């Protein structure tokens, strides 16, 4: 049998943007390890109890066992608060890394054949990561998470025909019920298991199809030991940064918010940054509630919370198939595109980013109005117009920039880069010196 080479052909891994996927995977490993620790001490129960732990401010206050166990985890379990904060930061960085990975795949065309399934995996990881983040932040049952529970109630009830029945089943009765925390805890574990399965499938696909590479970059021959050392260094760096953030950057201090009480909410309560687009859509959506066959239809919640995100993520998942149908490109691609070379796709990506960013900014319309002395009503109207006009403007500007860059490169390849240096010839004529390999033209 032929001897197995000590080197592995790794295509394109020497580019820094390939780290996004690895950072997401390593952050998920931290999430699993810290989550197992937290699950050992957390009690997902809404039964009422009287707190008697180490945090004296809330001692003697009635609260759910879920909130009491989270306080005990933060103040009575050795290292509990550190692990809680590392877990929270790992979730935020995981979603950020997945988003950046999706942007890289989209703008470089890395979703093309034979990597369509890899694209769908990353889209699924984004959706599941958001679901895991929402269900995870609700579990402490503090005053801040109560706002998310109220939002869940409103979104579920806005579903036509079955919304009310679904809400009663989910909450186990009238809001807030006694079942929502245990069921969201089960959903959190289920979503995490699905994410683990997707990451494992993605690893197998990478082993099968290999990595893509950027133009003008030859495949690298990297020793297995060197590759393991590089991956170990990135994993250690990811864990170290998460540990540093968990140690010095306070996040989600539930003891300052207090236990959740229906009918009240903490001032300045906002969802995680990755769910800001949902909050922004709810804030700027007009209060439309038409009556259809005698039943009110709550479009003010249904459209921004379910219809718009559903359309957005469906188009995101289906984009490779749509592009393949339009272009007729069925070939296999291992070389990535430069964004400027695919003007329409790049413009669509910029349009989508602008749409998401404007909704994300609209989630802070009250803070913007307060800090800059603006009218909240005028600001809301501005965002209503901007979320429609902004993506169109971004598409037009980005496409023109890409086409302009293409034209400039074509001109440079044909005529060379002008230097501004003019030389007189022996016959009295003049020529311009360029860096083009072609002979300068006499003028």
Image (tube, rainbow, N blue to C red):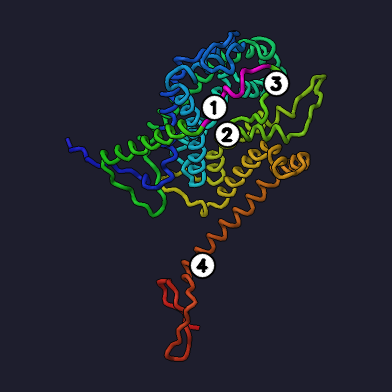
Per the image, the residue denoted by label 1 is 133
Q: Residues within 10 Å of mark 4 (few under 14, many from 20)?
A: few
The numbered disc on residue 354 is none
Nearer the observer: mark 2 or 4; the answer is: 2
- Comparing marks 4 and 3, which lies closer to the viewer? 3
CB under 8 Å between discs 1 and 2: yes
Q: Main secondary structure of the magenta part?
A: loop
Q: Earlier in the sequence, mark 2 or mark 4?
A: 2
Q: Residue 264: which disc?
A: 3
Tell me where residue 368 appears, x and y as whole percent.
Answer: 69, 41
Contact (Cβ within 8 Å) of mark 4 with mark 3: no
On the image, numbered disc 2 is attached to which residue? Answer: 274
User: Residue at the location (60% across, 14% down)?
Assistant: 180
Q: Position of residue 263 (x, y in %)?
A: 71, 18
**Which percent across, then down, holds residue 204?**
37, 31
Work out whether residue 153 or residue 410 is closer to the camera in this orientation and state it: 153
Alpha carbon separation for disc pair 3 and 1: 22 Å
Give the labeled residue for mark 4: 411
Residue in front for this viewpoint, 65 or 405: 65
Taking the magenta stretch, the answer to whether it contains residue 255 is yes
Distance, label 4 to label 3, CA atoms, is: 64 Å
In the image, residue 198 sits, relative to residue 438, either above or below, namely above
The answer to whether residue 342 is above or below residue 259 is: below
Residue 236 visible to the viewer:
yes
Boundaries of the magenta span: 250-261
């Amino acid at each position: 049998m032929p001897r197995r080479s000590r080197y592995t052909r790794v295509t394109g891994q020497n580019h820094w943007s390939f780290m996004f996927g690895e950072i997401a995977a390593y952050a998920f490993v931290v999430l699993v390890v810290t989550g197992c620790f937290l699950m050992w001490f957390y009690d997902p129960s809404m039964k009422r109890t009287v707190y008697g732990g180490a945090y004296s401010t809330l001692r003697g206050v009635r609260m759910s066992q879920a909130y009491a166990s989270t306080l005990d985890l933060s103040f009575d379990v050795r290292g509990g608060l550190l692990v809680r904060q590392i877990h929270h930061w790992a979730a935020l960085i995981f979603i950020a890394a997945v988003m950046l990975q999706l942007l890289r795949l989209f703008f470089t065309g890395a979703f093309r054949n034979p990597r369509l399934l890899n694209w769908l995996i990353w889209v699924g990881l984004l959706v599941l990561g958001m679901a895991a983040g929402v269900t995870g932040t609700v579990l402490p049952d503090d005053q801040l998470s109560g706002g998310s529970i109220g939002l869940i109630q409103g979104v579920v009830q806005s579903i036509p025909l079955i919304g009310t029945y679904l809400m009663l089943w989910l909450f186990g009765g009238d809001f807030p019920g006694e079942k929502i925390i245990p069921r969201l805890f089960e959903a959190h574990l289920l979503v995490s298991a699905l994410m683990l399965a997707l990451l494992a499938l993605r690893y197998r696909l990478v082993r099968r199809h290999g990595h893509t590479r950027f133009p003008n970059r030859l495949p690298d021959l990297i020793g297995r030991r060197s590759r393991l050392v590089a991956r170990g260094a990135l994993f250690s760096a990811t864990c170290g940064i998460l540990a540093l953030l968990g140690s010095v950057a306070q996040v989600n201090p539930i003891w300052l918010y207090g236990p959740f009480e229906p009918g009240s909410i903490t001032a300045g309560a906002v969802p995680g940054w990755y769910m800001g687009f949902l909050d922004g859509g709810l804030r700027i959506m007009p209060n439309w509630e038409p009556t259809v066959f005698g039943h009110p239809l709550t479009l003010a919640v249904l459209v921004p919370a379910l219809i718009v995100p559903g359309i957005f993520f469906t188009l995101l998942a289906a984009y490779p198939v749509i592009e393949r149908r339009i272009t007729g490109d069925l070939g296999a691609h291992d070389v990535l595109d430069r964004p400027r070379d695919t003007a329409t796709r790049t413009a669509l990506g910029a349009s989508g980013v602008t749409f998401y960013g404007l909704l994300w900014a609209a989630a802070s319309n009250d803070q913007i109005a307060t800090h800059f002395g603006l009218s909240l009503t005028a600001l809301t109207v501005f965002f209503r117009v901007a979320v429609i006009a902004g993506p169109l403007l971004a598409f037009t500007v980005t496409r023109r920039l890409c086409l302009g860059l293409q034209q400039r490169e074509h001109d440079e390849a044909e005529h060379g880069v002008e230097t501004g240096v003019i030389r007189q010839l022996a016959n009295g004529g003049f020529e311009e010196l360029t860096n083009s390999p072609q002979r300068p033209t006499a003028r």
